[in-house]
Image (tube, rainbow, N blue to C red):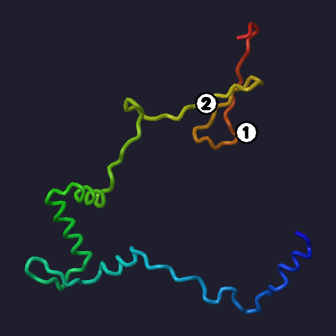
C-alpha cells in the first residue's frame, strides 16, 4: 500500500480525547444462565400440592431431594446410582492389561554410536544429559 493510500485511509480518523472511552455503552450484559436461574429458584418455597395438602414450608431443593430419595427407594436404578456416587464417590476402576496384569511403561534403551547405552526415563521429561548411561564393553571378535 502506497503512502498516499494510507494517508487517505486514515485521514478522517481521530484519536479519543483524554478520558473518553472507545466503547461508551460498555460490554453488553450477559444473558442469564440456566444455572443461575435454578440457583435462584431452588431456595424458594413453592405452593404446590403434596398429597392433599399445599406445601408452605419445603423449598424446591428439599422437594427435589425427597423425590430423588423416594425414586431411589422405589427401585429407580439411575437415581440410586447417582445417590450412591454423590455420597460415596465413584467406584475406582483399575486400569490393567489384557489379562488383568498391571500396565507397565516400557523402558527404552538407546544404543549410541560411541558404545554407550542410554536408558529412557519413566517420566519421559528428563534432558539427554540427565539420562542414565552405561558403557558396553566390546570384544575383538565383533560381538
| Badge 1 vs badge 2, beta-carbon distance below 8 Å | no
Q: Position of residue 89 (x, y in %)?
A: 32, 56
**Relative to 50, residue 69 above or below:** above
Q: Residues within 10 Å of mark 2 (few under 14, many from 20)?
A: few
State how far apart marks 1 and 2 are (Cα): 16 Å
Q: Is residue 15 above or below residue 64?
A: below
Quadrant (top left, top right, bottom left, bottom right) of the N terminus:
bottom right
Q: Secondary structure at mark 2?
A: loop
Q: Which residue is farthest right?
A: 3
Whole-percent x, y for residue 84 in the image: 26, 57
| Residue at image location 86% in from the left, 80% down from the top | 8
Q: In the orientation shown, which residue stands out farthest toward the left?
A: 52
Name the residue located 50 percent from the left edge and 79 percent from the top edge. 30
Q: Which mark is residue 108?
A: 2
The quadrant of the picture occupied by the C terminus is top right
Quarter of the image for residue 70 reads: bottom left
User: Label 1 belongs to which residue?
Assistant: 129
The x, y position of residue 64, in whole percent, is: 23, 71
Return the disc, 1 or 2, that comes first in the chain's sequence.
2
Q: Which of the 4 quarters of the picture holds residue 24?
A: bottom right
Left or right: 138 with respect to 74? right
Which residue shows up at 34% across the image and 76% down it? Answer: 38
Where disc 1 sits, the SS reads helix
Mark 1 residue crowding within 10 angstroms, few (<14) / some (14–19) / many (20+): few
In the image, 127 versus 98, the foreground residue is 98
Q: Position of residue 107 (x, y in %)?
A: 58, 31
Q: Nearer the viewer, residue 34 or 143?
A: 34
Amino acid at each position: 500500500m502506497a503512502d498516499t493510500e494510507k494517508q487517505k485511509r486514515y485521514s478522517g480518523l481521530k484519536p479519543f480525547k483524554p478520558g473518553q472511552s472507545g466503547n461508551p455503552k460498555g460490554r453488553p450484559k450477559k444473558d442469564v444462565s440456566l444455572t443461575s436461574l435454578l440457583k435462584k429458584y431452588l431456595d424458594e418455597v413453592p405452593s404446590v400440592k403434596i398429597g392433599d395438602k399445599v406445601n408452605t414450608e419445603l423449598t424446591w431443593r428439599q422437594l427435589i431431594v425427597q423425590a430423588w430419595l423416594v425414586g431411589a427407594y422405589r427401585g429407580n436404578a439411575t437415581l440410586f446410582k447417582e445417590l450412591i456416587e454423590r455420597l460415596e464417590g465413584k467406584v475406582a476402576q483399575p486400569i490393567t492389561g489384557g489379562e488383568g496384569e498391571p500396565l507397565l511403561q516400557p523402558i527404552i534403551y538407546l544404543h549410541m554410536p560411541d558404545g554407550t547405552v542410554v536408558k529412557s526415563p519413566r517420566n519421559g521429561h528428563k534432558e539427554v544429559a540427565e539420562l542414565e548411561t552405561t558403557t558396553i564393553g566390546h570384544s575383538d571378535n565383533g560381538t
